Amino acid sequence: MKPWTILSSKQVMRDRFMGLRTDRCIRDDGHIVEAYHVTELTDWVTVIPLTDTGNVVLVREYRHAGGVFTLGLPGGVSDPGETDWPSVGARELQEETGYTAQVMHHVGTCYPNPATQNNRLHYYLALGCKPTSTQSLDPNEEIEVLEMPYTEFLNYGSLEVQHALHAAALFYAERFLMRHPELRPPEET
């Protein structure tokens, strides 16, 4: 197999963080793909913030597209042109929770959905998190901050509403912590 060749591309919509384009492509076997829709997004960062007492700092917020409230991890989109992922993660952590990390460890990068999106998601394990300021939310954000023992959050599948990208965050965090057991949070809070 070979990558498809784009014969033509039409920008359907574009704003600061997102675009939608429709490509007409040809596969290596000659098959024409008449209309393939691609969502163009800036990269995202998700933070797994841990306190020295073994708690994970979580955000509870309404997710309009799904019409649900989620309990999950802080994170967000990068500004166009940004590539300093630890700084993006630290900014999102502070803005959404008011917490600051002593150290950020990159634990993984993935494509959230390479079938329809072109962006990547960068995961950071943030250690030594402490509240240092008030939240600095965007106008459309309404976020409740809480802490939960990390060992309890590992049972993520028991939550009523689950976010696939946050489940993936736990995969990356646990894989990293298996290689660095000295960084594993304590089990008592």
Image: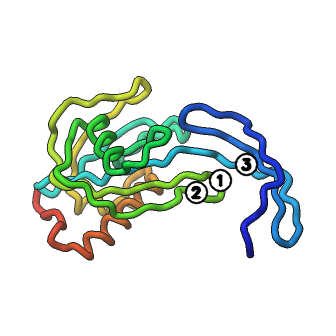
Please state which amino acid type lies under the numbered disc 2. Asn
Please indicate whether residue 44 sits to the left or right of residue 36 in the image: left
Mark 3 element type: strand
- Sequence-wise, the earlier of marks 3 and 2 is 3
Task: Name the spot of residue 34 as percent of width and height, x first.
Answer: 86, 53
Q: Residue at x 15, y 36 (%)?
A: 132
How far separated are the C-alphas under marks 3 and 2? 13 Å
How far separated are the C-alphas under marks 1 and 3? 7 Å
Camera-side residue of 7 and 48: 7
Q: Which residue is mark 1?
A: 116
Please indicate whether residue 181 sits to the left or right of residue 117 in the image: left
Q: Quadrant of residue 146?
A: top left
Task: Name the spot of residue 75 as percent of width and height, x first.
Answer: 37, 45
How far separated are the C-alphas under marks 1 and 2? 6 Å
Mark 1 element type: loop
- The reply to whether dot 1 and dot 2 touch (C-beta < 8 Å) is yes
Q: Which residue is mark 3?
A: 37
Q: Which residue is mark 2?
A: 113
- The reply to whether dot 1 and dot 3 touch (C-beta < 8 Å) is yes
Would residue 74 be seen by someone viewing this image from the given angle?
no
Q: Residue at x 17, y 48 (%)?
A: 129
Q: Residue at x 11, y 55 (%)?
A: 53
